Image (tube, rainbow, N blue to C red):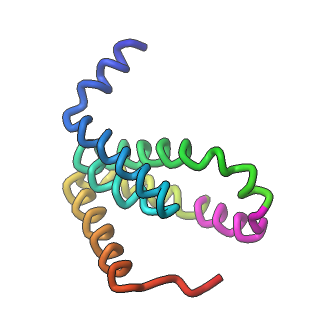
């Protein structure tokens, strides 16, 4: 086990990744969303695509845990079921793509998506549905 920890601390760019997680936590705390838009560009430049997604999932699972009870109480079962169905259908394709894509291309794709979404938010676009 200590060898795994030593390998983790030997990752080049770990400091930037830690700073990105701290900044993402602040953004999520104030806005309630957006942490993935901060973590993924940095994680994709430090880790492989598969490692970056695993890292994001791990960080995103820990943050909302205190809200889980209220979300289960207030959430719509049908909506959660549809989301889970989408995950079950899309996950195999996503994992296949992540295992085959060049890490540099993956990093640029993530960064371009984040910049595009940021531009939409800055232009005032908001989801108007329920």
- Give percent across and percent down for residue 84: 65, 61
Residue positioned 70% across, 64% down in the render: 80
Residue positioned 69% across, 50% down in the render: 68
Q: Is residue 56 magenta?
A: no
Left or right, 22 with reference to 112: right
Image quadrant occupied by the C terminus: bottom right
Q: Nearer the viewer, residue 83 or 61?
A: 61
- Give percent across and percent down for residue 40: 34, 54
Q: Residue furthest top?
A: 2
- Give percent across and percent down for residue 96: 42, 54
- In the image, is residue 14 above or below residue 97? above
Left or right, 8 with reference to 26: left
Q: Nearer the viewer, residue 54 or 23?
A: 23
- Give percent across and percent down for residue 15: 24, 36
- In the image, is residue 22 above or below residue 11? below
Total numbered labels: 0
- In the image, is residue 99 above or below residue 122? above
Left or right, 39 with reference to 75: left
Image quadrant occupied by the N terminus: top left
Residue positioned 24% across, 31% down in the render: 11
- In the image, is residue 17 above or below residue 110? above
Residue positioned 24% across, 25% down in the render: 10
Q: Give the residues drawn in magenta, as a range.
A: 74-87
């Amino acid at each position: 086990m200590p060898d795994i920890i030593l390998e983790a601390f030997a990752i080049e760019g770990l400091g930037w990744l830690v700073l990105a997680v701290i900044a993402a936590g602040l953004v999520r705390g104030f806005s309630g969303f957006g942490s993935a838009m901060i973590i993924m560009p940095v994680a994709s430049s430090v880790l492989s695509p598969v490692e970056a997604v695993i890292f994001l999932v791990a960080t995103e699972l820990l943050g909302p845990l205190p809200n889980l009870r209220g979300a289960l109480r207030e959430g719509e079962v049908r909506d959660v079921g549809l989301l889970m169905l989408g995950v079950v259908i899309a996950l195999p394709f996503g994992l296949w793509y992540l295992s085959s894509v060049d890490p540099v291309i993956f990093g640029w794709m993530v960064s371009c998506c984040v910049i595009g979404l940021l531009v939409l938010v800055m232009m005032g676009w908001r989801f108007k549905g329920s």
